[in-house]
Structure formats: structure tokens, C-alpha cells
Image (spheres, rainbow, N blue to C red):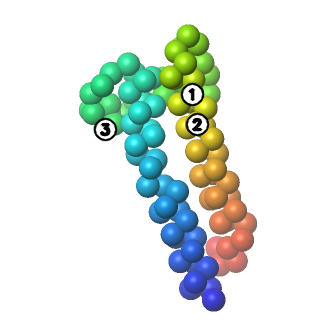
Amino acid sequence: MDFIAKNIWFILFIVWGLPLGYYRSKFRKIVYQTDSWLINIKPYFWKEIKGLFGNIYPENLKYKKLRNFYLFYLTIYLLLFVTYLIFDENL
């Protein structure tokens, strides 16, 4: 049964994590105001963090909508991870 539970957690993390790259890319492109794919591999984080937890473009409705969705998505990811840590007996 433990093997099945581990596989379920693994599958949940994979399924929930697959679109992460897409959402992060869209968010970074809005925050850094670029359409270049290179923004995904550059080590810029400060403005992204400020954009995630603040409101750096208050007039941009697309930014606000994506920021709120991305925060929701990351919150669910965090809750999934915390739930895994709480219910996993073999830490």
C-alpha cells in the first residue's frame, strides 16, 4: 500500500507541475515586458518576486489576472507539498 501511496503523490506532483513552466514563462514575460524566450533562462528574480507579491503594473489588467492565477496555482502547489510532508510517515 505504501508503494501505491508514493506513486499517487508522484503522479499528483507531476500532473500539477507540468503547466508550471508555461505559467511562469507567461508571468515573467509580462513582468519583464518582453516576448523573448530567453527570459525563461535568465537568473532574474527580484522583479518577479515583487511582481508576484506586489502590484508593479496596477493599470495592466492582464498582469493582475495572471498574477492572481499564478499565486493561486503556486499556493495549491505549496499545499500539496505540505500535505505530502504531513502525511508521509517515512521522512
The residue singled out by tag 3 in the image is: 41
Q: CA distance from mark 3 to mark 1?
A: 24 Å
Q: Secondary structure at mark 3?
A: loop
The numbered disc on residue 69 is: 2
Q: Is residue 83 above or below residue 61?
A: below
Q: Position of residue 78 (x, y in %)?
A: 63, 51
- Residue found at x 55% / y 10%: 59
- Residue found at x 45% / y 31%: 27
- Residue found at x 48% / y 55%: 17
Q: Secondary structure at mark 2?
A: helix
| Quadrant where the N terminus is found in the figure | bottom right
Which residue type carries mark 1? Lys
Q: Position of residue 13 (x, y in %)?
A: 53, 62
Labels 3, 2: front one: 2
Instruction: Place residue 36 in its image quadrant.
Output: top left
User: N-terminal of the two: label 3 or label 1?
Assistant: 3
| Quadrant where the C terminus is found in the figure | bottom right
Q: CA distance from mark 3 to mark 2?
A: 22 Å
User: N-terminal of the two: label 3 or label 2?
Assistant: 3
Looking at the image, residue 75 sits to the left or right of residue 23; the answer is: right
Q: Secondary structure at mark 1?
A: helix
Q: Are marks 3 and 1 in contact (CB under 8 Å)?
A: no
Which residue type carries mark 2? Phe
The numbered disc on residue 65 is: 1
Q: Are marks 1 and 2 in contact (CB under 8 Å)?
A: yes
Q: Position of residue 85 (x, y in %)?
A: 67, 65
**Camera sees residue 55:** yes
